[in-house]
Image (cartoon, rainbow, N blue to C red):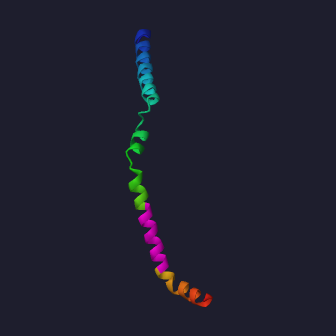
């Protein structure tokens, strides 16, 4: 491989890298695209339902103790 071929290869690599940088500057990276596709209202609703379920299960296990404390305070 001679000097001209090496320089042509390096310039091609530089052009490809420059294209990647310009795409990144435009804000089209795959992580932003992936995160932009998530609907946060659905996530918030799911977290709320799971939280209510956990609290309900916990209260059912601790219901007897809570009622005893409430009766003692009255």
Figure disc tally: 0
**The C terminus lies in quadrant:** bottom right
Q: Could you say where residue 17 lies in the image, as x and y percent from the top left?
A: 44, 24
Residue at left offset 43%, top offset 57% = 44
Q: Could you say where residue 30 lies in the image, as x and y percent from the top left?
A: 40, 38
**Quarter of the view holding residue 5:** top left
Residue closest to the eye, 14 or 3:
14
Residue at left offset 57%, top offset 90% = 71
Q: Farthest right residue?
A: 73
Residue closest to the eye, 66 or 5:
66
Vertical side of 73 occupied by 26: above or below: above
Identify the main secondary structure in magenta. helix
Q: Could you say where residue 33 lies in the image, as x and y percent from the top left?
A: 39, 40
Q: Farthest front residue?
A: 74
Q: Is residue 58 magenta?
A: yes
Q: Does the magenta stretch include residue 3?
A: no
Vertical side of 34 occupied by 23: above or below: above
Residue closest to the eye, 19 or 46:
46
**The N terminus lies in quadrant:** top left
Residue at left offset 49%, top offset 78% = 59
Vertical side of 66 occupied by 29: above or below: above
**Quarter of the view holding residue 49:** bottom left
Residue closest to the eye, 61 or 9:
61
Vertical side of 46 occupied by 31: above or below: above
Q: Could you say where residue 67 lies in the image, as x and y percent from the top left?
A: 53, 86
Task: Look at the image and give the residue range highlighted in magenta.
Answer: 47-59
């Amino acid at each position: 491989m001679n000097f001209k071929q090496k320089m042509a290869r390096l310039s091609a690599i530089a052009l490809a890298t420059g294209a990647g940088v310009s795409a990144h500057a435009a804000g089209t990276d795959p992580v932003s695209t992936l995160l932009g596709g998530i609907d946060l209202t659905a996530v918030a609703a799911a977290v709320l339902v799971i939280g209510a379920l956990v609290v309900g299960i916990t209260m059912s296990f601790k219901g007897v103790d809570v009622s005893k404390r409430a009766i003692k305070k009255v």
